[in-house]
Image (spheres, helix red, strand yellow):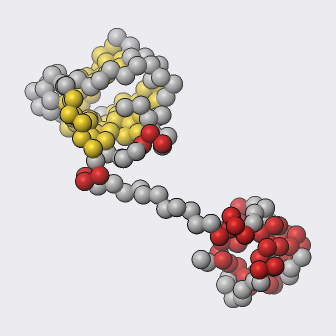
Amino acid sequence: MDIGNKIRQLRTQKGLTLEELASRSELTKGFLSQLERNLTSPSIDSLDDILEALGTNLSDFFREDKVERFIFREEDFFVDERDGCTVHWIVPNTQKNRMEPILLTLPENGQSFELAPHSGEEFGYVIEGEATLECDGKQSTLHKGETFYLHGRTFHSIRNTHKKPAQILWVSTPPLF
C-alpha cells in the first residue's frame, strides 16, 4: 500500500494544506511532506494522529476496497429467448446497480415486452435495422444509428416492422428488465 499517497489523497479531499494537517496532528509540516512522498515512514502513533486529524481511523485506512469487475465479455452474457425477441443481459447482476443495459434483438415482426410506467429513464441506440418505438399511443420509427431517450411515465415497447432483424442497445435506470 502506498501510505504516503493515500494520506495525500485524504488530505486534499478534506481541503487541508500540509500546514493545517501538521497543526491538527501535532506533527511537523516537513515530516508530513516527506511522508506523503514516501521518504519516511510513520510510527503507529503518528499515523493514528494523522488519520484522526483526517477524520478516519487505522481500520478504515487499511481496509482494501473490493475491486469490482467492470469488464464483461460475451461468455458472461445471459441470453433469454422470448416470444418476439431475444434479450442479451450484457452485464451480470445489474439489479444492484443504478442502470441496466440489455442488447435486444427483434426478428421481423418481433416485439419487446411492454414496460409499465415507472419513475426512471431509458435510453436506446439502434445498432442494426429499424424499429418502431411505441410510447403513449404514438409511434416513431428509429433507423440504424438513431437513439431514443424517454422518461418511463407511460407504457412503451419497441417492435420491428421490417424484414431485417433489428438490434437495439437499451439502458434503463433503475434496473427493470
Q: Residue at x 48, y 42 (%)?
A: 96
Closest to the observer, 56 or 171: 56
For the C terminus, the quadrant is top left
Q: In the displayed image of the protein, which residue is found farthest to the front?
A: 59
Does residue 47 appear left or right of residue 130 in this picture?
A: right
| 167 left or right of 172 in image | left
On the rendered structure, is 151 left or right of 168?
right
State the image coordinates of residue 16 (x, y, percent, origin top left): 79, 65
Q: Quadrant of residue 128?
A: top left
Residue 133: x %, y % from top left = 30, 22
Above/below status of 57 relative to 162: below
Q: Residue at x 27, y 25 (%)?
A: 112
Which residue is drawn at the image coordinates 75% and 63% (left, top)?
A: 56
Residue furthest top as drawn: 137
Relative height, residue 60 to residue 102 (above, below): below
Quadrant for the N terminus, please: bottom right
Quarter residue 3 falls in: bottom right
Can the viewer see residue 71? yes
Q: Position of residue 146 (x, y in %)?
A: 30, 34
Q: Nearer the viewer, residue 134 or 35?
A: 35
The answer, for residue 11, to whether it is visible in the render is no
List x then y, in percent, for residue 103.
Answer: 28, 39
